[in-house]
Image (cartoon, rainbow, N blue to C red):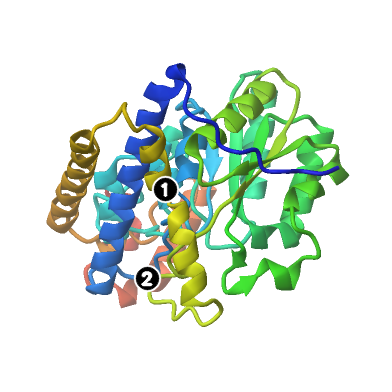
Amino acid sequence: MTYTLAPAAPLAEGEIALGKTLLQMMVRIRALEEGIERHFLAGEIPGFAHLSIGQEAVAAGVCAALRRDDYIASTHRGHGHTLAKGAAMKAMVAELFARSDGMCRGKGGSMHIADFSIGMLGANGVVAGGFGLVAGAALAARLRKTDQVAVCFFGDGATNRGPFHENLNLAAIWDLPALFVLENNRYASTTSTAETMKIEDVAIRADGYGMPARIVDGFDAVAVHHAALDAIGRARRGAGPTFIECKTYRVRGHYIGDPERYRTKDEVEAHKSDDPIVRLQARLAGELSQGEFEALWDAAKSEFAEALSFARASAPPETGEAFRGAYAGDRDPETPHGAFALREEASFAPFFSDAPSAGTGSVH
């Protein structure tokens, strides 16, 4: 089977509102990640952070087609997916700053950020770590007889790992309501796909599992959205999973501070013309004034500034809270899980100067 990229069509009259909505989300994602980059380099954000600058069209396009009660699982590069699924920027920034008001109480950080209240099952530091989560969520929706859908975002490197093949096969044979979205940015960490695959289009791998696949221009948020709508509608009808390959590119390194010795500056510069925000703004010419476009940026930057103030005002987590939430039932010392959690905490108590007694139970 041969897959080709369809050229981007001008926005139809009925797509203007959609285009503006997607553009606004992409601007919010860009403002968030540029802010993260600045404050990470300033030493205010601990751990690692991986940016998706250049790839915003995928997160915005797919998540705009989902409901709040649908599920997504992300990668280590998950800020855009999380925000687009409906997460509060304040809670996200506080989480990256490792503060107690973060959405994971400061314990997850960038690579493990999650918000179950909006169906965001988590970013993942393990390559291909989201496939099992999505297959499980899709199976749960099937067993509960709901029409919820689960979406797995992943990179090209994940398609060379076992969980990709195992879970695509499982989703296909059980007709699970799942959508597998490949963000093919041409690099698995610092290794080019040209060095790890003999194929140009990864989507052909879905054929081996009897799964329909599409390739879309990953810089075109509207095209991504329409592809996602079709796949999600198919999943809700009980027709099974779909594979979508989004051809895209990240203009920042694998992580903030990456020396990028694996690609040339000329290559990166050549892809800056594919900026999905600039492209969609151009397609909205005549429907969105320069002032309106600048207002989108001003609002996004103000939102980040408020989130930053919120994060800085939030206290760090108490060390005695380190094990809270690690085990189901850890709030009840009478349960096996709770007793185990308390024993684990007790073993670390000597290292926590401000930790409460291990026998006090949960303090929240």
327 vs 80, nearest the viewer: 80
Q: Residue 184, image x and y in percent? A: 61, 55
Name above or below for residue 95 compared with residue 157. Answer: above
Establish if 287 lies above or below 1.
above
Residue furthest to the front in view is 286
Rendered residue at 43%/18% (across/down): 13
Is tag 2's residue or tag 1's residue first in the polypeptide sequence? 2
* Residue at the spot of label 2: 47
Give the total number of marks visible in the rendering.
2
Q: Quadrant of the N terminus?
A: top right
The image's mark for residue 80 is 1
332 left or right of 224 in image: left
Badge 2: how crowded within 10 Å, few (<14), some, or many (20+)? Answer: few
Q: Residue at x 75, y 28 (%)?
A: 240
> Is 36 on the left-hand or right-hand side of 52?
left
Residue at image position (24%, 66%) is 39
Q: Position of residue 121 (x, y in %)?
A: 51, 43
Q: Secondary structure at mark 2?
A: loop
Of badges 2 and 1, nearer the viewer stands 1
Q: Secondary structure at mark 1?
A: helix
Q: Is residue 74 visible?
A: yes
For badge 1, the amino acid type reads Gly
Q: Which mark is residue 245?
A: none
Task: Identify whether 180 is placed above or below 52.
Answer: above
Amino acid of disc 2: Gly
Q: At x 71% / y 69%, what residue is drawn?
A: 194
Residue 105 visible in image: no
